[in-house]
Image: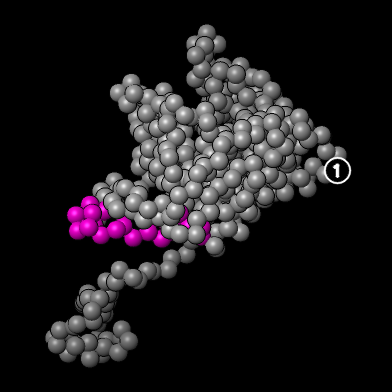
Amino acid sequence: MVFIGYHLSASNSYSSTFKFKFQQFDKCRSTLPGVIICANRKLRPDESVWRPKQSTQNVDFPPKLPKGKKKPYPIPFNEIKQAAKMDRKLTSKGIEKPLEPPKNGLLVPDLVPVAYEVFDAWKLLIKGLSELLHVIPVYGCSECSEVHVAPTGHCILDCEGRTSSTRHSSHAWVKGTVNDIIVPIESYHLFDPFGRRVMHDTRFEYDRIPAVVELCIQAGVDIPEFPSRRRSNPIRMFGKKVIDKGGNLEEPESLHVAKSSAILDFDTYRACERFPPPPLSDIPKIAQETIDAYQIVKKGVRKLMKKYTVKACGYCSEVHVGPWGHNAKLCGSFKHQWRDGKHGWQDATIDEVLPPNYVWHVRDINGPPIQSKLKRYYGKAPAVVEVCVQAGASIPVEYKPMMRLDIVIPDTDEAAMIA
């Protein structure tokens, strides 16, 4: 038996020799005895091959980024250099930079309903978590950022606080709050994202609100206490310089509505005190509504970030919603002395705007606390998901592989005999 392989090009320009030989075959059935043909063709750039999606049984935990290094760029650095090269090329030719909404200061009409949906789901998420924390116990370490959702704290020795050496890396557990479940990532509220930048000396003139809420405001949500400029004329840019801001409009003075009822609806600070404990019969319903709201917020923020620019510091957790980062010198992370405290701005990711805050998944609440020796058998889940699941909500499919539900947790004596 003879095997003959042919490779077909994307342009279908086959040689006359191949056409002559191909006439001897009919639908991959050879007219010559004992001969099999196998032909393939290269895919064009606009073509793709459909492959069935394989369900992952178990996945590894997301790696912890080292504190002594800069975060990796979410966009490949070669693409960043290529875009900068194209901008310089247009500038050298005296051509204005082509901008589309929202890069030119105008709203994207299709994303305004998405912004309102995210904003309403964000308020529902805070309300649901505040009610669930009256029933579901949550503990946080007073020395580090570790959080545990269980009647008691876990026994895993991985505390990284300042005094952890005196406690042999054991955690110092205290009662947790909503801020332990949803990491409070705040951003400066800007009336005009393309206006004057926040300087170090003027940083107290701007209100700090959750970054998710600021993203919704810039995407079209109107809040009277936090006004935002809505342009009718687009801005014009020549390189990196704004040559036309779409008309001059004086910015209003900051209202500083820290104690207003408007900000209390979407702020996580002392949220448990604003909502009373719910009836025990309503807890599963509240848990399902809360986890659905979390999914809506996460999906909507990802959709908004594809159009609206959000910057994050490459060294610390600071986030700024707008085309450029601010100039407040508040970075105290890796080599901040070399940068005079300035942030190293780069494009933000969804996990920087809405951190998942992974915690250990507890299968049996009434069982013994999780141990360090059995750490590799436990799974993890976002803190919001863990609270809602323990309150009776169904587990979303995308979190099941990391929760390792199909792994049998052995006893401490059995784990010593496992290779």
| Category of crowding for the residue at label 1, using alpha-carbon neighbours closer than 10 angstroms: few (below 14), some (14–19), many (at least 20) | few
Q: Is residue 239 magenta?
A: no
Residue at x 72% of width, y 49% of height: 289
What residue lies at 41% left-to-right and 23% top-to-bottom? Answer: 332
Type of the residue with mark 1:
Ser
Task: Report the magenta residues as a range.
Answer: 87-108
Q: Residue at x 37, y 59 (%)?
A: 99
Does 137 appear above or below 24? above
Identify which residue, 64 or 80, lies in the foreground: 80
Q: Is residue 198 left or right of residue 176?
A: left
Determine which quarter of the picture holds residue 134. Answer: top right
Helix, strand, or loop for circle 1?
helix
Q: Which residue is mark 1?
A: 281
The image position of residue 109, as x and y in percent, is 54, 62
Q: Is residue 186 above or below residue 114?
A: above
Using the image, determine if residue 412 lies above or below residue 284: above
Outermost residue toward the top? 166
Q: Is residue 126 visible?
A: no
Location of the N terminus (image quadrant):
bottom left
Residue depicted at x 34% and y 23%: 340
Rendered position, 200 above or below 25: above
Magenta: predominant secondary structure element?
loop
Q: Nearer the viewer, residue 328 or 399?
A: 328
Residue 139 screen position, x and y as percent: 66, 25
Q: Quadrant of residue 143?
A: top right
Total of numbered circles in the picture?
1
Residue 103 magenta: yes
Nearest the viewer among 284 and 203 is 203
